[in-house]
Amino acid sequence: MDGNENFVKVTIYGQEYTIKAPADARYIKNIAEYVDEKMREVQEELSTPQVPAKVAILAAMNISDDLFAERRNRDKSNGEVERRVSSLIEVVEEAIQQ
């Protein structure tokens, strides 16, 4: 067993969990709070109370959608940066040749 592992107690959607992770305890708690918040948002949007497993799956879908959207935005931004860098390189090369 690695000596860098932490055991952190967190509460997600009213259920307590002990998480073993090599990450900082505050980081693990922040993740748990985020998941708890997303699950509660899902339940608020539903007309009737749902079993926690269903709420968790819907929250996971929402979190995954957020992740995929961020990846698309990052890829788009990276593409724009690459285009601008290429353009600047061309300008610099032309200036050097003159």
Image (cartoon, rainbow, N blue to C red):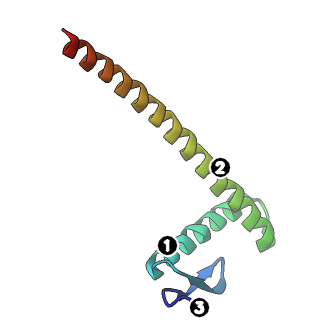
Q: Residue at x 52, y 86 (%)?
A: 5
Q: Nearer the viewer, mark 3 or mark 2?
A: 3
Front residue of this view, candidates 1 and 55: 1
Q: Residue at x 45, y 35 (%)?
A: 77
- Label 3 CA crowd tier, 10 Å (few <14, some 14–19, many 20+): few
Q: Residue 75 location in percent, x, y?
A: 52, 38
- Secondary structure of the residue carrying numbered label 1: helix
Amino acid at dot 1: Asn
Quadrant the C terminus occupies: top left
Q: Quadrant of residue 44?
A: bottom right
- Label 2 CA crowd tier, 10 Å (few <14, some 14–19, many 20+): few
Q: Badge 2 is on which residue?
A: 65
Front residue of this view, candidates 34 and 71: 71
Total labels: the figure holds 3
Q: Quadrant of residue 72?
A: top right
Which of the two labelled residues, at mark 1 and mark 2, occupies the earlier sequence position?
A: 1
Which of the two labelled residues, at mark 3 and mark 2, occupies the earlier sequence position?
A: 3
Q: Badge 1 is on which residue?
A: 30
The Cα atoms of the two marked residues, 1 and 2, are separated by 19 Å
Amino acid at dot 3: Met
Q: Residue at x 42, y 30 (%)?
A: 82
Q: Badge 3 is on which residue?
A: 1
- Label 1 CA crowd tier, 10 Å (few <14, some 14–19, many 20+): few
3 over 95 or under it: above or below: below
95 over 61 or under it: above or below: above
